[in-house]
Image (cartoon, rainbow, N blue to C red):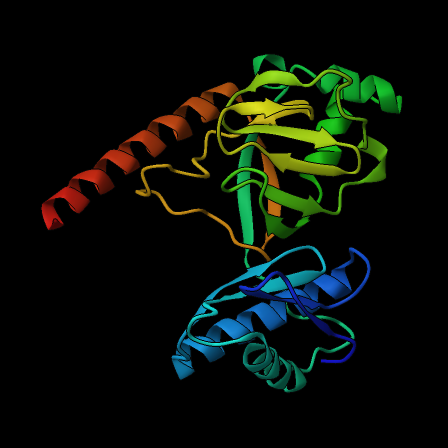
Amino acid sequence: MNEITIKPAGDTAVQVFCGKEISEAVGDKVSALTAALRDFFAAEKIAGIGEVVPAFSSLIVRYDPLVTDYDEVAFRVGRVAADIEISEEGGSRGTIVEIPVCYGGEFGEDLADVAAHNGITEQEVIDIHSGGLYRLYMIGFLPGFPYLGGLDKRICCPRLKSPRTKIPTGAVGIGGEQTGIYPMESPGGWRLIGRTPVTLFDPEGILPLPYKAGDMIKFVAIDKAEYDRIAAAEAKRKEKLRREKGAGA
């Protein structure tokens, strides 16, 4: 892999830059190197190595400075990176994850504003948003919050001038040229266009995160009846896993 830059990030991490811009090509490099480093460190069982955390155009390798040091980690990262080849077509994308969304109404109070800002109808916003395929570049801000690339410029919309103090769990929003999902109740300033009944981040740790950095997100439009059905199924699934986990303890 060419054109990477390795720098210290404090005294407990190495930061690896795979490019200078947010793009599919750079995202492919980050995803490929993240996967390769995780596999390498797991196979070699190198002492002192912690998480490998991807971002938009870089990644972090955490380490214990009492066990290893920057020079050693940087050397190993460079060796792994040198062995990676990525074709011009990419090929480092992860799984396509479908996220059902009930758009508008009580679930998407800003849908009309997004439509008006762009001079199109609410249904056109829904069709465009659910018709896209979004690269999940990184997870952050909140546990499980996906930063997605690929929003169609026809439905971009500025953030709210005054952020809300409370956004419901599962809210799907648009902020500038990005779209994302609030995995838990929190403040926020993105324009809300819908909500998903799928559990994203589970603070109890019973339900796994349904996606990871490098995956592609596909939003699927559903109605209120389907939303309620999926929400009920999610609750039953969690309760079943909770009982199984308790029985195995």
Front-most of 16 and 88? 16
Image-quadrant location for residue 16: bottom right
Query: Can I make out residue 225 in this image?
Result: yes
The residue shown at (31%, 38%) is 204
- Indicate left or right for 170 with 235 as reference: right
Q: What residue do we see at 59% from left, 83% from top? A: 80
Residue 30: x %, y % from top left: 66, 66
Instruction: Give the residue at x 68% y 19%.
Output: 163
Q: Is residue 31 left or right of residue 25?
A: left
Q: Name the residue at 79% across, 33% down.
A: 176
**Residue placed most toward the observer, 174 or 140:** 140
Above or below, 188 against 54 in this view is above
**Splitting the image into 4 quarters, where does residue 13 fall?**
bottom right
Q: Is residue 86 above or below residue 189?
A: below
Taking the image as drawn, is residue 102 in sight? no
Residue 117: % across, % down: 86, 20
Where residue 160 appears, as percent x and y from the top left, is 75, 20
Of residues 215 and 27, the one nearer the viewer is: 27
Which percent across, then down, holds residue 34?
A: 57, 68
Q: Is residue 220 above or below residue 157?
A: below
Q: How many marks?
A: 0
Q: What quarter of the picture does the N terminus occupy?
A: bottom right
